[in-house]
Image: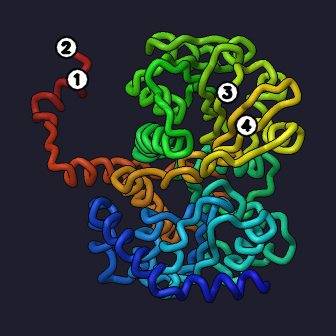
Amino acid sequence: MLLLLLYVNKIKNSKLSNSGELSYKWARNHMKILDATINKLKKNKPLEGITLGFCLHITKETSVLLMGAKELGAKVAACGANPLTTQDDIAAYLASNGINIFAWNNQSNKEYNHCIERVLEYKPNILTDDGADMNIKSHFVKKYNALDIMGSTEETTAGVNRLKAIEQKGKLRYPVIAVNNAYTKHMFDNKYGTGQSTIDGYLRSMNLLFASKRVVVVGYGWVGKGVAMRCKGMGSKVIVTEISAIKALEAHMDGFDVMTMSKACRIGDIFITCTGMINVITKKHLENMKDGAIVGNVGHFDVEINTKFLLKESKSVNEVRANLSECILNNTKKIYLIGRGRVANLVAAEGHPPEVMAQSFSNQILSILYILKNHKTMKNVVSGVPLEIDRQIAINALHAMNINIDTLTKEQKNYMNDWNL
């Protein structure tokens, strides 16, 4: 509690708040889709009388979503989705503008969980989560079971998987919209957003050349595809490891070397995990890596790399640069860990660029409004973003970029619907 009081004083710092305001304005100017959506809806205050609880990475892009929700009439309470990813100037700016914000950079796990609980104490009607930590507490911490929650939206693959597991057990208490599964989210946010911000995070932490390096991309889902594409563009020799035969075949056809991790670990220079799965880089893999190998993770949770082995069982651990730990193993090899194995593109950089997050957060706003309108008839399952919302966001995105596309002529529509060709 003392730390929370100290934090409240910190976010009242006017210098921090002024810096956050400039970042907020910069982001909003580059999030034209979201800005247009907010401006179109705010006259009617559709969220008047509704409390929203957000558990998201507190970045300049997120500030546009939170301020937008407030403009639509909502009472907003928010916390960070990771102990290390909050931008303090953004938190200060949000606090100075009436957002109930509980987030600061470099929290302990205890502080992180306490902040989630503070948001739930506001008794939110709808939750927006990134990784499902807030949803997990609302389901399995007894004092929050009585909350009148209409529904929730979920931003990430990891969170969607956790919520589906709750659904399969028959314990999901309210409907959830998997924003992550919208085409206008995962095809752009996961692929282009993570692809670019991963390069940014790695460069800031290591400041080494990507060209000529063997980069091992672990997992070839939408995130892995984006990371592999950007590493290739930087001149790297990209290796992909996969457990899915279909994704492995796709990676091969895309021009990447595909092999097992037991082989890749011996020849890779840089490793980037993108799976959301536990222990994809194990103690044995780390011990077999080249001296000087660099490992990092861009999945939501810090479980993909055996960081306990690196940080607790190494002969010594030294912070050689911001967000870069030199771990000297008992076999004398040096392995370098980015951002303590947490989500490197947010810990070591600033996360996704605003143009990409505009689409993701437009999905969030419209899905929140959909839950508000339809929650009484929705089943307690994890479902996708309604297709009409997804399509409209794509149309809005093209419009914001001044891109025009063709439409079917009457003749073409008749041809498409006629079997007598």
Judging by the rendered image, the residue that carries numbered circle 3 is 292
Judging by the rendered image, the residue that carries numbered circle 2 is 421
First of labels 1, 4 by sequence position: 4
* Residue 404 screen position, x and y as percent: 14, 43
Cα–Cα span, label 3 and label 4: 19 Å
Cα–Cα span, label 1 and label 3: 63 Å
Query: Could you tell me which residue is drawn at 89 percent across and 39 percent down?
Result: 313
Image quadrant occupied by the N terminus: bottom right
Towards the viewer: 345 or 16: 16
Is the C-beta separation of discs 2 and 1 under 8 Å?
yes
The amino acid pointed to by label 2 is Leu
* Residue 307 screen position, x and y as percent: 79, 41
Query: Could you tell me which residue is drawn at 20 percent across and 49 percent down?
Result: 401
| Numbered badge on residue 418 | 1
Element marked by disc 3: loop
The amino acid pointed to by label 1 is Asp
Cα–Cα span, label 2 and label 4: 54 Å
Is the C-beta separation of discs 1 and 4 under 8 Å?
no
Image quadrant occupied by the C terminus: top left
Towards the viewer: 392 or 6: 6
Is the C-beta separation of discs 3 and 4 under 8 Å?
no
292 on left or right of 49: right
Query: Could you tell me which residue is drawn at 70 percent across and 51 percent down?
Result: 163
347 on left or right of 326: left
Element marked by disc 2: loop
Cα–Cα span, label 2 and label 3: 64 Å
| Numbered badge on residue 59 | none
Judging by the rendered image, the residue that carries numbered circle 4 is 304
The amino acid pointed to by label 3 is Gly
* Residue 184 screen position, x and y as percent: 40, 46
